[in-house]
Image (cartoon, grey):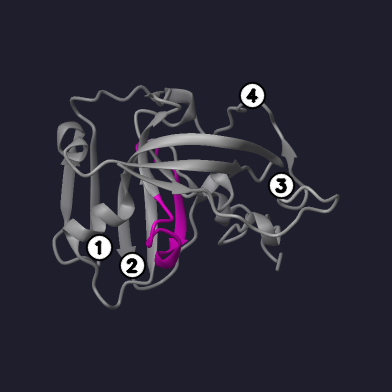
Amino acid sequence: MGITRGFTGGARRGGDTRLPPGQYDTGAGWPVLSAELTPQVDLDEWTLTVDGLVDRPTTWDWRGIHALPPSSYFGDIHCVTTWSKFDTTFSGVSVDALLQVTGVRLEATHVFATSTTGYTTNLPLSDITDGKAWIVWEFDGKPLTAEHGGPVRLLVPHLYFWKSAKWVTRLELRDHDEQGFWERNGYHDRGDPWLEQRYQGDA
């Protein structure tokens, strides 16, 4: 099983090198925030599709995605609402493993993630490749709970957590950027915590 340590960034004002600017350590807690009601997803019907600008559009069911090489992330996560949580462990499969199956066309530059609720978010392709993103179904060795995005969520831990779409069902590769739900409502298109890219117009 591959394990990737968390990305590190610059020092926070005040000297704590693990907290991005404007963030606080939430400690043992993990706040539950969502733009929509928590869905109840039937694992017998759940699928994840990777399509768009790929060579082999592919849909995995629950058994199929678990047959891929497992991978885990150990590190910190950061929410735009200013909390950060240290030393988290998520397990699932690397997005790189999915893209190895589907292939990526040369013209692909961005990814548009969609959840079972209709929630969407946009990401540069470079932010979900090379060991930067996962599809996860476990947190700290236990199944990911529904309120935190279970059975499966996208995990992009080096960006603010709204980019880690809960209940994800589709990753569409595109040759252009298109804003998702929160981006259309004023959040930054990328969301780097170390640059405090919280809202449109931030650096």
Who's the residue at 30% across and 56% down the image? 96
What residue did someone put label 4 on?
Answer: 28
Q: What label sits on residue 19 in the rendered view?
A: 3
Query: Magenta segment, which residues?
Result: 116-133
Residue 84, position as x, y percentages in the image: 66, 39
Using the numbered discs, state the Cα–Cα distance from disc 3 to disc 4 in whole angstroms: 15 Å
SS class, disc 2:
strand
Q: Using the image as rendered, state which of residue 178 and residue 53 is in the foreground.
A: 53
User: Which callout, 1 or 3, points at the residue further toward the start of the chain?
Assistant: 3
User: Which disc is residue 52 wearing?
Assistant: 1
Taking the spot 66% from the left edge, 46% from the top edge, the residue there is 80
Q: Nearer the viewer, mark 1 or mark 4?
A: 4
**Which residue type does callout 3 highlight?**
Leu
Q: Secondary structure at mark 1?
A: strand
Q: Is residue 166 among what the camera can see?
A: yes
Percent x, y of residue 141: 40, 25
Q: Which residue is mark 2?
A: 174
Q: Amino acid at mark 4?
A: Ala
Q: Is residue 34 above or below residue 82?
A: above
Q: Are marks 1 and 2 in contact (CB under 8 Å)?
A: yes
Q: Residue at x 66, y 62 (%)?
A: 200
What kind of element bears circle 4? Answer: loop
